Image (cartoon, rainbow, N blue to C red):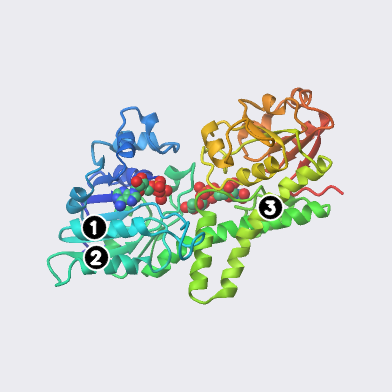
Amino acid sequence: MPPDSSSPTVTSICCIGAGYVGGPTMAVIADRCPDVQVTVVDINQARIDAWNAADLSQLPVYEPGLDAVVARARGRNLHFSTAVEEHIAAADMVFISVNTPTKTKGIGAGQASDLRWVEACARTVAKAATGHTIVVEKSTLPVRTAEAVQAILAAANPNGGSRRFSVLSNPEFLAEGSAITDLEAPDRVLIGGNDPSAIEALAALYASWVPQERILRTNLWSSELSKLTANAFLAQRISSINSIAALCEATEANVQEVARAIGTDSRIGPKFLKAGPGFGGSCFQKDILNLVYLCRHYGLEEVAAYWEQVVSLNQWQQQRIAHVLITKLFGTVSGKHIGVLGFAFKADTNDTRESPAIRICKELLEEGAILQIVDPKVSEQQLAQDLGQASGAGEGRWHQVPDVEQAATGADALLLLTEWQHFAQINWPAVAALMRQPAWLFDARAKADANAARAAGLNVWTVGEGQL
Ligand code: UDX
Ligand code: ADP
């Protein structure tokens, strides 16, 4: 649909929140819409300074290709600032892209989203905006959050004064590690709202680089709910294939063969069918728990229980892998050295949020294991924070090591948890020679060369591979 000629033309955007979503998203919008001034504002001065750093390797978010996009647009029509109100006042369109973590206390603790930062933003916009302002929810939000945002904005303008607000939902679907390609060539852009001209104003921005047929318009609530649903469906596929992996191990089936066989059915498709140690990352668990909370809120207990099971299965898979390892090592890992290959929640990131490695390693530490952890991107400080204990402390203890060889030294087992590419190219004869025999490789990602490891004398367990 061509942009509605009555739609306002956006020339100035302000994005509140210079985080993982706001920064890269606005960088790509500025890059693709050179006639629009884009300012990303944040209350965190250090973060803004980092976005303004002359050295592009210091940007607060690492994503392949982001530095080049920022280099092209920054200073031209992409700006980073802490002057929040000033830039809201100057903007035709304000994106809200702030954090919405799971609540840690009070009603809905552990499941519902904490919306205090979104509400604070709505209040700031209500105070500072001028003229007609289109307010776009970019953060992942529970369905009907826009109602609260609308109510706060309406209260700011009691007598139908000169100011006017339109609220849109425009969730972001980017994945870590591929954020720039996801933004530059999205499968779809979703815009939800009740004001057709505001929808078309936002659609016109995206139309600078996204084909029209990929720009979907829905009502506000469908858009909000679609983001949670997309993540729930993706996570569900992982729990589904992991459940089948366990069954494959109990029979003589091979989950990779099963995944290939079912993935060629065009109705199922081949993606997101890789068995592993369970899903991690900042979104999947959080969004499903949020969905579960919403279902309960609306009295849909069976629906809540259905989705809750996706998270339970994920946690079970992590526990199961720890237990397989302990069982194979004669029922005890106390005092045994175990090399842990990878700690990030997936390859090509230093992000460890909800990483399956956290639960699995904690379980092994609890059993008294001595972990030798290698990950090319995760810092020792991060490991200490995630594992809740300092390096070298305790009976069950951990150390960070720089390479696979040192992870293997004196170890009874290697446990591969993140699919870093170089773990596919391990020199198994050399590594096996460093281990205490009988030694094991536990490959929770089916990444390593199992034949080479076996040929080097190791016992090998691979997720989802039945061996009776
Ligand atoms: C996800 C969604 O993909 C993205 O659309 C949304 O905006 C944010 O959440 P992200 O968390 O960056 O993105 O990572 P993703 O690549 O989706 O992987 C999530 C987890 O699932 C990782 O732990 C990954 O290892 C795991 N995974 C993924 C599998 O175990 N098997 C698969 O087949 C795919
Ligand atoms: P996401 O992954 O959703 O982008 P992040 O935590 O990476 O989330 O970033 C959110 C950013 O929003 C943080 O830098 C935080 O300082 C900023 N922020 C939160 N509340 C406000 C606010 N009221 N005004 C301006 N910035 C805010």
- The CA distance from mark 1 to mark 3 is 44 Å
Q: Residue furthest bottom?
A: 299
Q: SS class of the residue under badge 2?
A: helix
**Considering the image in quadrants, where does the N terminus appear?**
bottom left
- The CA distance from mark 3 to mark 2 is 45 Å
Of callouts 1 and 3, the N-terminal one: 1
- Viewed as shown, does residue 349 lie left or right of 37? right
Disc 3 marks a residue whose amino acid type is Gln
Count residues near mark 1 (Cα–Cα under 10 Å), then give few for <14, some for 14-19, many for 20+.
many
Q: Is the Cβ of the residue at disc 3 closer than 8 Å to that at disc 2?
A: no
Q: Is the Cβ of the residue at disc 1 closer than 8 Å to that at disc 2?
A: yes
Q: Mark 2 — residue?
A: 153
Q: Nearer the viewer, residue 187 or 331?
A: 331
Q: SS class of the residue under badge 3?
A: helix
- Viewed as shown, does residue 242 lie left or right of 75? right
Q: SS class of the residue under badge 1?
A: helix
Q: Residue furthest front?
A: 394
Q: Nearer the viewer, residue 261 or 310?
A: 310
Q: In this picture, is 388 found above or below 239?
A: above
Q: Position of residue 235 (x, y in %)?
A: 58, 57
Name the residue at 66% across, 33% down: 423
Q: Position of residue 152 (x, y in %)?
A: 26, 66
Q: Mark 3 — residue?
A: 317
Disc 1 marks a residue whose amino acid type is Val
Count residues near mark 2 (Cα–Cα under 10 Å), then give few for <14, some for 14-19, many for 20+.
many
Of callouts 3 and 2, the N-terminal one: 2
Q: Mark 1 — residue?
A: 125
